[in-house]
Amino acid sequence: MSKHIKAVQNLYPNVHPTSPLFMDLLYARDPNQARDLFYQERNRVLLSLVDKRKFKRVLELAGATGLLAEMYLNLHEETQFYLHTDYSIVACKLALANLRRYPQSYVKLIDVCTDLNLLPWNYDLVISTSLEHFPKGTDYDILKRMKTGTHVLWSLCKVAARIPTHLHPYESVEYVKARFKDWLEIVNIGEYRTVVLLHGIRL
């Protein structure tokens, strides 16, 4: 468990770690907690899975403070529309500040578990590095809404010990392959430290 999560739990023991309020408190306490070297390196490896492909419309689900969006947009000038979402008000405000130099980026406050119908689904690429934070089955709910041929780029956390903010760990590469075999043509799959990295195409 990260020192940031422990610190917030110590200060606010009655706030559940998966609530938007908990994430607001987390980012307010340390605005850069999701932008350290681990996240930068994880993102570099993840983005390398699609470095030779071009996408005009991109959706990022639960993107925290915008680090992945910045890194992606720095590499992909062809992108015309990048919608960054999160369910923390504080995270969205931080993302707005971090993405203001990218005119093609937009930030939306959304609860990914309940408000998926508020989003259009005409994207070329859907990215998420946070699916383990959502209840089991949310990944399927997301996939159901995608059009055939949509590219998917996911970082899926493997968690050996129970972490309060990780509701659904993805255990192993074999688990990921079995879980998504009826939904995705898996183009590439790999690992970086505690995460499985997936590039697939919606069937």
Image: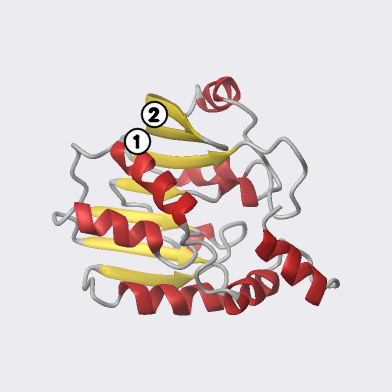
Residue drawn at (66%, 65%) of the image: 4
Q: Are marks 2 and 1 in contact (CB under 8 Å)?
A: yes
Residue located beneath label 2 in the image: 203
User: Residue 177, relative to residue 85: is it above or below?
Assistant: above
Q: Residue furthest right?
A: 14
Q: SS at mark 2? A: loop
User: Residue 111, relative to residue 59: is it above or below?
Assistant: below
- Whether residue 129 sits left or right of residue 106 in the image: it is right
Closer-to-camera residue (88/44): 44
User: Residue 57, relative to residue 195: is it above or below?
Assistant: below
Please indicate, yes or no, whether residue 199 appears anywhere in the rendered image: yes
Could you give the CA–CA distance between mark 2 and mark 1, rounded to whole angstroms? 5 Å
Q: At label 1, which amino acid type do we have?
A: Thr
Residue drawn at (62%, 34%) of the image: 170
Where is residue 159? Give x, y as percent: 68, 38
- Whether residue 133 sits left or right of residue 94 in the image: it is right
Closer-to-camera residue (45/50): 45
* CA neighbours of label 1 inside 10 A, class few (<14), some (14 to 19), many (20+): some
Where is residue 30? Give x, y as percent: 57, 74
Residue drawn at (28%, 46%) of the image: 124
User: Residue 92, relative to residue 157: is it above or below?
Assistant: below
Instruction: Give residue 148's mark.
Output: 1
Q: At label 2, which amino acid type do we have?
A: Leu
Where is residue 195? Give x, y as percent: 54, 37
